[in-house]
Amino acid sequence: MNHWLTAPILIPLIGGILQTFMGYAPMSLRRTLALATTVLIVVATLGLLFMADDGSYRVYAFGNWQPPFGIVLVLDRLAAFMLVMTSVLALFCHLFALGGADEGNRQFHTLFLFQLMGLNIAFLTGDLFNLFVAFEVLLIASYGLLMHGGGTARTVPGLHYVVLNLVGSAIFLISVGMIYSVTGTLNMADLAVKIPQVTGENLHLVKAGGMMLLVVFALKAAVLPLCFWLPKAYAHATAPVAALFAVMTKVGVYAIIRVYLLVFGDDAGELANLGMDWLFPLALITLAMGVIGALGANNLRSLIAWQVIISVGTLLAPIALGSREGISAALFYMLSTTWTVGGLFLVATLIASNRGGAADRLITAPKMRHRTCLSALFMVGAVAAAGLPPLSGFFGKILILKSVEPGANMAWLWSVVLIGSFLTVVAYSRAGSIVFWRTVDGHLEDKDQQHWPTSFAAGALTALSIVIVALAGPINEYTDAAAAQLLDTSAYLEILDVPVVGEDN
Amino acid sequence: MELVFALVIGTLTATGVFLLLRARTFPVVMGLTLLSYGVNLFLFASGRLTTGGQPILGSTDNYTDPLPQALVLTAIVIGFAMTAFLVVMALRNLADNDDDHVDGKQPKQDAHTSKLEREVTGK
């Protein structure tokens, strides 16, 4: 039992509840408290990261129920990694929001914090049904955030997003029911014990359940053919929300890593590596689809939204192959791409607010304000996202390419990733040259509304790509260790024997 | 009982999916509601169907699995909240776009079909 595991859930919960009742308090007070909450989350998650780095599993059993009978929170290297990735991204998004994006809705900070709570529950939970609940918590907050700022342009993508995710929830429940009906448990560690023992006709039931679960996670992760909701929804969301949503697809990727490596891993008998032979080609097609979308985008924000899909494809391909190096490389790339895409969303919004009526559309327009600074930020982001040296995306992609063993898979992965990266570079250069270089005479009439939090947040989040390069050694060691820990599933099963407080033994 | 139960789940789900694929927001909301009823019943059945059994061990000879009941309860609460939110979204869509089409407005139609529609709907 380790009570610190509840900190990343309780801090946003308490902060969010405070915000709920402070809707009419002065703006400065609400902002200070909200930002303080996010900073506390970053501190807590960093603490958990150092705790998890020793390679052991830490367990918190709710209500002191012995697992598998109660719900457990489990902290391992992967969970801590995801928590830190999310909280750092959230801190900069939140800082950006203080520049004015949080006005117009009294409950922005509440929703933002509840969204973080849902994400943190999803990363920490060791129970399949609790994962469903976590998804719902983060989804209902995301519905509100997606609609934040109003405007009729957001209604239709928001409606699609809500309907799709409700269907996803229904499929999630069906698959949970199918798995439960055979195994009689939903604790992930217990499932990993029970699934290899399933035989006979029950096997098909679990198999169908497992595949349907993959559909749900693929919907969250926006894998083709379930990715078409994403570009519209993300391109229309408010900047800090879109940037935070860069991590939402990674929740789906996380769930795939967690459930399919542990429950349907190599030890799962007849169900070993369920669905992974489907996931690999789908991931590559997703990547290709994302590249096509990026080339066809007519504004910066939808270009970046397609980049989210590209990175999901790049991430899932090595995960589907399931080697230790591949998973480690995917985690490294996930860190890089999440922060970069988040930063790019913020930079694109800054660009849009400095181009007058042309906003972020890829058309010629009068020369924008702050062109030097913004073009430098955009270039850093684009280089990191497309995977050019010397920034972090390059190292992530190199690690992914190096992780595959020679063979047909290698040929496919190398060709799709390399051609895809080249075409992504083309897409970014096209967008950048139109936005920054192709100007017409004229001047902007609207006022310069840039505040320091927005510029600082966008700059800092983009610059994290450089930080990742500087710390590439330690980060790669950590992801290596995390991948090794993930593949050694027998250690995870020991959480079933964890003594709860007050037991005699 | 199993057959009736299975048929009910099947009917609810099929009707739900059919309505979900309609082009107006109201049938979509109804479809999702029916789908969630079907899912809830399915989840309930995942603990096996027993009659007259209490969900407490040792109280009667045959007991029923209490966990699916807890799961269903959670799923019902969440589904209800989500449906309520969806209704608000659908109304917002109607107010914003003066149309309850799921894409905000209808795709372009040729004169013939719109005339047909006017005849059918009486508009």
Image: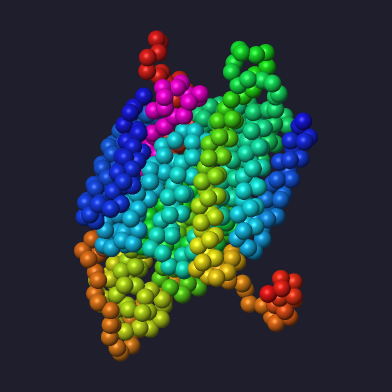
**What x and y, as percent, mark residue A185?**
57, 28
Q: What are the residue bounds of the magenta stretch?
A: A60-85
**What x and y, as percent, mark residue A92?**
29, 55
* Residue extending farthest top: A504
Residue at left offset 67%, top offset 77%: B109
Q: In which quadrant of the rendered view does residue B108 lie? A: bottom right
* Residue extending farthest front: B122
**What x and y, as percent, mark residue A80?**
36, 39
Give the answer, above or below, for where A188 lies relative to A311: above
Q: Is residue A44 visible?
A: yes
* Residue extending farthest bottom: A441
Quarter holding the C terminus of chain A? top left
The tally of labels here is 0
Q: Is residue B25 magenta?
A: no
Give the answer, above or below, for where A450 lies relative to A181: below
Residue at left offset 38%, top offset 74%: A360
Give the answer, above or below, for where A309 lies relative to B76: below
Colouring style: rainbow
Residue at left offset 44%, top offset 47%: A138
**What x and y, as percent, mark residue B19?**
68, 56
Q: Is residue A83 magenta?
A: yes
Q: Nearer the viewer, residue A113 or A360?
A: A113
